[in-house]
Image (cartoon, rainbow, N blue to C red):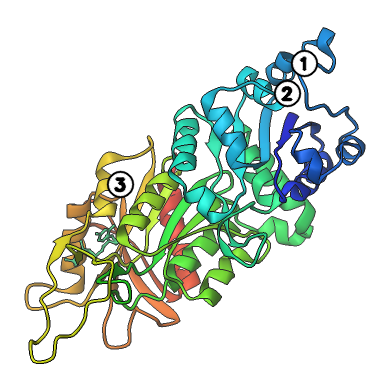
């Protein structure tokens, strides 16, 4: 495959070198187009030596070859890694002030941007709007990973690992390429033969953890979800070859670390409130084959959140907290369908009561929410939340039982992916 690797000017440009080597090792022809700023971080000779092709940044180099159009026209895939906030702003505006941006305008093949920047820049409304514009136009913008950034800060904005960028980008052109590249370098022949890669080339989003609704700057309404089932789902999907985004609501650091490390790390987007979780799930879900809502989402939030801490007035008793209803993210996803053929999966944590059993409530929820699958589990009395194992009954949208799973959360996760895999086109 003929790949153009754009590199814009951020500290993560060094990872573009690793990505270049990886793509070359997989047999692809790669031409690197750095911006001027990228060459402040990595020199042109490095890119030239590893790609075996000339490197230029300007449209005025090789004018007779009309390379500012020719490169984009003849490429099978364009990857920009890292894509800085500036590069994405220029691409969204359709500017063409260097070789990389002219190439992006000329390219008619899949274009993948792997952003890397500080969390504040990633979260800025200007960047969010540029990313939304690019995605609307069909550009595939990879969710940045979460983790240690250049300084002491951590958060979303880190360039995903080169293996993950390659996997996500190649899967857009041909999922079979991903299967090959996953199996060849890391697995022994025996392991490869038994490995299940039925989700290779699929993009999945899993929400996990419990949302927190602020009462004031120091207090919140939360729940007991540890996020372990969601993390097990993310890990299981990654192990089966999927490109996974975990939307993590208030997970403990050691739980999040489980999906950031290992041979197939997931992208992580950290969120706190239901509103943040909804935005993150919908952003990543726009391009996903599967969305699994494993997070425990608060049904209500305080109607107002004062900027200052609420003070106790002695003798006056507690001030009432007025609550308003949160949107039902799962029901929205199920009814809207952000993408054709998307499989939407929910959870129902039930206790059973005088009005019905755990399964009765699960069936009613399956029909009400409109999801393709609902995993029903009994909670309370030491079951479900925070435990190492789980037991679920998998229902389809009509409330009929299509699977049963019990064991470790990873075993339950694999059983759920088995049910999902049967629904994928
Ligand atoms: N869910 C959601 N948005 C909400 C509430 C729940 O997306 N505002 C999702 C959860 O992630 C889960 C499923 O819906 O996948 C079931 O959540 P649950 O709290 O059990 O359902 P509710 O609709 O809140 O029903 P109830 O609390 O009455 O049992």
For residue 142, say whether it is visible: yes
Which residue position is annotated with label 2? 99
Q: Number of labelled discs?
A: 3
Q: Residues within 10 Å of mark 2 (few under 14, many from 20)?
A: many
Q: Nearer the viewer, mark 3 or mark 2?
A: 2
Circle 1 sits on which residue?
67
Q: Earlier in the sequence, mark 3 or mark 2?
A: 2
Q: Is residue 226 above or below residue 9?
A: below
Residue contact between numbered discs 3 and 1, judged by CB atoms under 8 Å? no
Q: 181 or 14: which is nearer to us?
A: 14
334 vs 135: above or below: below
List the residue tagged with mark 3: 333
415, 215: nearer the viewer: 215
How packed is label 1: few (under 14 Cα within 10 Å), some, or many (20 or more)? some
Identify which residue is drawn at 20% across, 77% down: 351
Q: CA distance from mark 3 to mark 2?
A: 40 Å
The reply to whether dot 1 and dot 2 touch (C-beta < 8 Å) is yes
């Amino acid at each position: 495959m003929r790949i153009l690797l754009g590199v814009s000017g951020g500290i993560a440009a060094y990872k573009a070198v690793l990505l270049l080597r990886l793509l070359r090792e997989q047999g692809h022809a790669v031409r690197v187009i750095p911006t001027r700023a990228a060459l402040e971080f990595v020199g042109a000779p490095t890119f030239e030596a590893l790609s075996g092709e000339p490197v230029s940044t300007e449209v005025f180099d090789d004018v007779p070859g009309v390379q500012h159009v020719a490169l984009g026209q003849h490429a099978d895939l364009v990857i920009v890694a890292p894509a800085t906030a500036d590069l994405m702003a220029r691409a969204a505006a359709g500017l063409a002030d260097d070789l990389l941006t002219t190439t992006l305008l000329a390219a008619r093949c899949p274009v993948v941007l792997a952003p890397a920047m500080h969390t504040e820049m990633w979260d800025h409304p200007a960047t969010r709007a540029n990313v939304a514009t690019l995605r609307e136009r069909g550009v595939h913008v990879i969710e940045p990973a979460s983790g240690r950034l250049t300084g002491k800060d951590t958060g979303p904005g880190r360039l995903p690992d080169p293996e993950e960028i390659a996997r996500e980008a190649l899967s857009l052109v041909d999922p079979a390429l991903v299967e090959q590249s996953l199996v060849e370098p890391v697995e022994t022949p025996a392991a490869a033969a038994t490995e299940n890669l039925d989700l290779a080339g699929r993009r999945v989003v899993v929400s996990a953890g419990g949302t927190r609704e602020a009462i004031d700057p120091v207090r919140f309404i939360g729940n007991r979800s540890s996020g372990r089932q969601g993390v097990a789902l993310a890990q299981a999907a990654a192990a089966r070859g999927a490109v996974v985004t975990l939307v993590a609501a208030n997970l403990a650091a050691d739980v999040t670390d489980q999906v950031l490390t290992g041979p197939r790390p997931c992208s992580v987007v950290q969120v706190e409130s239901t509103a943040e979780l909804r935005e993150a799930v919908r952003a990543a879900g726009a391009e996903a084959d599967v969305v699994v809502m494993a997070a425990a989402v608060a049904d209500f939030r305080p109607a107002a959140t004062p900027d200052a801490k609420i003070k106790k007035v002695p003798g006056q008793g507690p001030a009432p907290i007025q609550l308003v209803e949160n949107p039902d993210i799962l029901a929205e996803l199920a009814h809207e369908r952000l993408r054709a053929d998307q499989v939407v999966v929910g959870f129902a944590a039930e206790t059973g009561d005088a009005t019905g059993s755990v399964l009765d409530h699960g069936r009613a929820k399956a029909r009400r929410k409109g999801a393709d699958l609902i995993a029903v589990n009994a909670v309370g009395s030491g079951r479900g939340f925070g435990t190492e194992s789980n037991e679920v009954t998998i229902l389809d949208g009509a409330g009929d039982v299509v699977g049963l799973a019990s064991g470790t959360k990873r075993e339950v996760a694999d059983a759920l992916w088995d049910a999902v895999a049967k629904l994928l086109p």
